[in-house]
Image (tube, grey):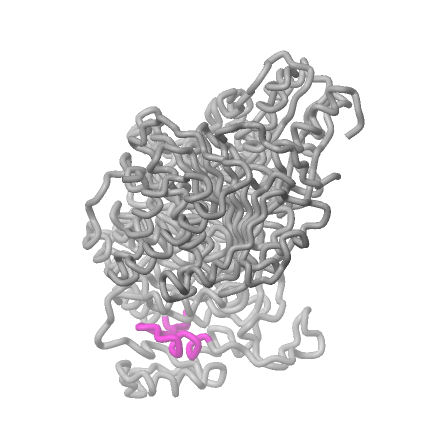
Amino acid sequence: MTTVELTFKDYKSKLKPIWCPGCGDFGVVASIYRALAAIGRPPHEVAFISGIGCSSRIPGYTTAYGFNTVHGRALPIAQGIKLANPELLVLVAGGDGDGFSIGGGHVPHAIRRNPDLTYIVMDNQIYGLTKGQLSPTSACGSKTPTSSYGSLEQPVNPLLYVLSYGAGFVAQATPANMKDMTAVIEEAIRYPGFSFVNVQSPCVTYGGDHQQVKAHKKWMKGLESLEHDPADRMAAMELASHYGEELHTGVLYRNPDPPRTYGELVRERQEALAGGLPRERILESFIQR
Amino acid sequence: MTTEPESSPPERVPATDLVIGMAGSGGDGIVSAGESLISAAASEGYHAMMTKSFGSQIRGGESSCRVRIGTTALHNPGGVLDVAVALNWEDFLRFGGELPVGDHTVVIYEEATKVAPDELPLGDVTPTDVFPVPIKDIAKKSAGTQLAKNTVVLGLLAGWFDLAPDAILSGVRKRFAKKSAELVEMNEKAFQAGIDYAKEHPLRQARPLARVERSTTGLMLLDGNDMCAAASIFAGCDFFGGYPITPSTEVMQYLTREIWRYGGSVLQAEDEIAGVGAAVGASFAGKKAMTATSGPGMALKTEMLGLATIAELPLVLVNVQRGGPSTGLPTKPEQSDLFQAAFSGHGDVLRPVLAATSVADTFRVTVEAFNLAEHYQTPVIVLSDQEIAQRKETVDAIDTDAFEILHRRVPTEGELEDYHRYASTESGISPISHPGLEGGNYLAGGIEHDEKGSPSVKGEVHVRMNEKRFRKLDPLLERDDLFSVEGDADAALGMIAWGSVAGVCREALALVRASGVRAKLLVPTLLWPVAERIYGEFLSSLERGLIVELSHQGQLHRMLRMHVDLPPGLEPLTRSGANPFRPAEVARQLTQLQNGGVR
């Protein structure tokens, strides 16, 4: 593992984003450049994995090793990468549809394994890439091209979802407060274990007015100003239950006593069992005696 | 299609080959008796093979095994039983064609079933040697418990067929020594009681198995799933991601015990998709990776195979075939996933498909799959099936030094100065970097990309990349070593068979040729892409023959018709899974073709 003097420019690739001008995801990628620069891991030691969606294009806008995979499967692929090379800094990103609809089943399992990776969801409550359909976090009653008369189902609550499965680090951010978002992402990456950041990332094309940066500036509430204790998981869950009604930003929960990560446990097992027949003699164990 | 078991009495004394089929309720210890038999036979230098078959109940239900012991190499579990053991008839009959009884079969059954020897529920078959044996009573009297029934059966078989009684006994002792000295003694008594009963009730005609002079040095005894898993470690596999599914689960179970010793890891994923996904991730990170599944799991993994194909990531996927569609017949073999292997997934794709024909062959094929995957940077599918995967057989020592292990081509320092992940090369194979390698940074993905890896939807880029992904696999079509031609090379009569059925056809070929007919057999390891030139050469002398497959459709036959001009006299011989082909019937059908007859 190396740390070197780097600036955010070292992480910015030459690819021009496909995002609409003003998209919240520009802010997220800028925060990621800065957070990575602050941490100082060179780009070739960073693996950035995503699924499918507007936000899932993000790995290509960094100079890290990127893997823009299939819809909803970024987390399992990222876990394979981290297991294969525990030295890598592994970032996972995607949208609310990728993470909580098609890929929702993978989230609890990533959390219970506790791999040391950071999952950033750019939550815009809409399917932007396919032009504005209902997403799993859209408010009940949302009128979209696939819910012409208003949606009938309640939204998923991403914060409560990950907290209830025991994620060790849970935070929320918005591009309306770039400084705070960069700090939160940096802290998430530094957390030893599974960390989750829900970014309320405005969709300028299909999102409602209340979802835009301008509105966020009015209704966001910094958790620090609320004197929330991020070590208090129950208090975090109470705050998280207001998802959709309130926009809390900052660290909701940080396990003050992080358990050992999956990678550490795997390494321990590998060390305990090392030795035995070399690979080229593996068949000897089947010889009849 | 005919499925009747023919019943020609074996004309060989002493016998060079013995096929024993046993069935009972789960808990009767039938399979463990079979295990004792094959390990005893192996220790005496015999070739031995055991297939297991179950109902799909979790515990209890019917269970059976076929044990074949021979003085020469065995390629399949044999035909009509020489010996049938029924602990109760209801369970025995549930296996139907898997345990065919003929007139020459020695039938041993539990007397307490109260079935009269001349009223066996076997239809038209009237075996001449029939022994109702009070197996349960003998067990109770000798060992004090009917749990020793299976050990009594071992004693009966040892006594009647002179089957290495010392070796069986020492195996029984070894098995129970782990439990208690009392159990060892009880089972010794049960075994001896079985032998005594056999001596007191001799066969009408003695059928001793011929002795064999053979070195047992390096002789292995294992099943196809363990062989596949061990071969993957030999080939350098560092990561397995998967999800339990019958009949492939033992691949993951073996690796879960062993892979850590080599610094690798296994992830039991939350589902089939996550299992293959983690393997794709590990491959992206530079490690050799594998997943194993069966048909329904393969269906779920398909999207991820498309990703690995376009991202050009090495990956080995093993499909241990079972009867389908859907849940189908989870515990029975079938060869009906060839289309799925070749054609699953959307887009213009070519993924190599290999098939193993036996437990021993599973080693070669698994290593080959890793080599192809790494060299050509592609997913490779290995087709096994329930029979090979779960049958245990003796395997001669494998000269592992003869196997070359290939690795993916990593970029040189020069190439890293201006790295192009998908550089257009003559071979179509581009240098592949991995996270952690400075200068090799690139964007992999499911989206079409240019040589640098940058996303592109330009038509001309898509043409170039498709062409490259296909071009790199062209050399496969010249891999004569992935095809085996057996018998008379210029014969006009022949067969094509793959997977476990190839083992049946090998014996059928020997039977046909022993009767003085010239014939040949083609066994492809590489099923897809179709190597047209190699098939063409085999077919050039062929006028009549059979493509033998354990599926309703005959999927290889149909795939060959897409690519090769098949002679009109080459016919499919197909049958749905769980109805195994037998060597003698295949030989008979081939001989009928030779005579110009209709099958």
Q: Which percent across, then down, holds residue B224?
A: 44, 42
Q: Quadrant of the C terminus of chain A?
A: top left
Please give left or right for residue A95 compared with residue B554 in the image. left
- Which residue in the rendered view is the most extreme toward the front? B200
Q: Position of residue A20 (x, y in %)?
A: 53, 59
Q: In the displayed structure, would residue A220 be above or below residue B266?
A: below
Residue projecting furthest to the top: B490
Picture coordinates of residue B119 (x, y %)?
68, 54
Left or right, B410 with reference to B584? left
Percent across and percent down for residue A204 are: 54, 67
Please state the total of marks drawn on the protein image.
0
Left-right relation of A82 to B106: left
Q: Can residue B302 be seen in this snapshot?
A: no
Q: Is residue A246 above or below residue B495?
A: below
Boundaries of the magenta span: A158-177
Instruction: Give the residue at x 73% y 29%.
Output: B571
- Is A186 in front, or is B350? B350
- Which residue is at 48% across, 58% downward? B135
Q: Nearer the viewer, residue B223 or B99?
A: B99
Q: Tell me if I can see residue A207 in this picture.
A: yes
Residue drawn at x 64%, y 36% is: B549
Residue B473 located within the stretch drawn in magenta = no
Q: Nearer the viewer, residue B394 or A282?
A: B394
